[in-house]
Image (tube, rainbow, N blue to C red):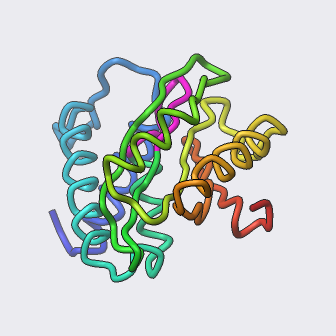
Amino acid sequence: MGSPSQLTLFTEEIVTSLICSDSEERIYPGLGVTDTDGERCIQQALSVLEKRLKKARPVMSNPTALKDYLRLQIGGLDYEMFGIVWTDSQLNLIGFNKMFRGTINQTSVYPREVVREAMICNASACIFVHNHPSGSCQPSTADESLTQQLRSALALVDVRVLDHVIVSRTGTLSMAEKGLL
């Protein structure tokens, strides 16, 4: 295929086109590559990013890899999904749970279930993540309110909220980086 940089550019092009595409099946002319091949590529990319995140000590030491991982996980969905990245007391990755599925513009999130999952994971900290199918990564008033409700609920069981990341097909926004936590 060529040099590693050409392969990286090719992979990025496939991933971006799959995330942004509404077509059922596309063939990349002259390459014989279909969306199915691209989906396998995304799964491989997710696997590599997850391994890197698990090796990263702590997980927050590589925020770009974390955001890329989250964007690949839920950025291309056409419905809202709310998930949580769980960490231990040293901020090492425990896991990522897709917890609540919603509609095109909202998701019902239940604090009781979030606290329950934190206890099951034996988590010390977490990062909330949800997607905006609209493409805008700007947090709504409801997003900010939910973050505070969940933060209060988790504080009762000594679980810190590190961030709330909003992802879309085209980017990410960290509420912590924007000073909204």
Residue found at x 35% / y 50%: 96
Q: Is residue 35 above or below residue 91?
A: above
Question: 84 or 140, which lies in front?
Answer: 84
**Residue 79 locus on image (x, y percent):** 53, 23
Residue found at x 77% / y 65%: 178
Give the left or right position of residue 153, taking residue 62 as reference: right
Residue found at x 43% / y 55%: 85
Residue found at x 62% / y 46%: 153
**Residue 91 locus on image (x, y percent):** 41, 74
Give the left or right position of residue 84, taking residue 163 as reference: left
Q: Which quadrant would residue 109 be assigned to in this image?
A: top right
Q: Is residue 158 above or below residue 152?
A: below
**Residue 68 locus on image (x, y percent):** 44, 59
**Residue 55 locus on image (x, y percent):** 25, 77
Magenta-colored stretch includes residue 82: yes
Q: Is residue 54 above or below residue 98?
A: below
Q: Which quadrant would residue 150 be assigned to in this image?
A: top right
Question: 132 or 10, which lies in front?
Answer: 132
Q: Is residue 162 above or below residue 130?
A: below
Give the left or right position of residue 24, taking residue 37 as reference: right
Quarter of the image that includes the N terminus: bottom left
Magenta-colored stretch includes residue 162: no
Q: Which quadrant would residue 61 be assigned to in this image?
A: bottom left
Farthest residue, direction front? 156
Question: 134 or 27, which lies in front?
Answer: 134
Give the left or right position of residue 138, taking residue 69 as reference: right
Quarter of the image that includes the C terminus: bottom right
Q: Which residues are magenta?
A: 73-83
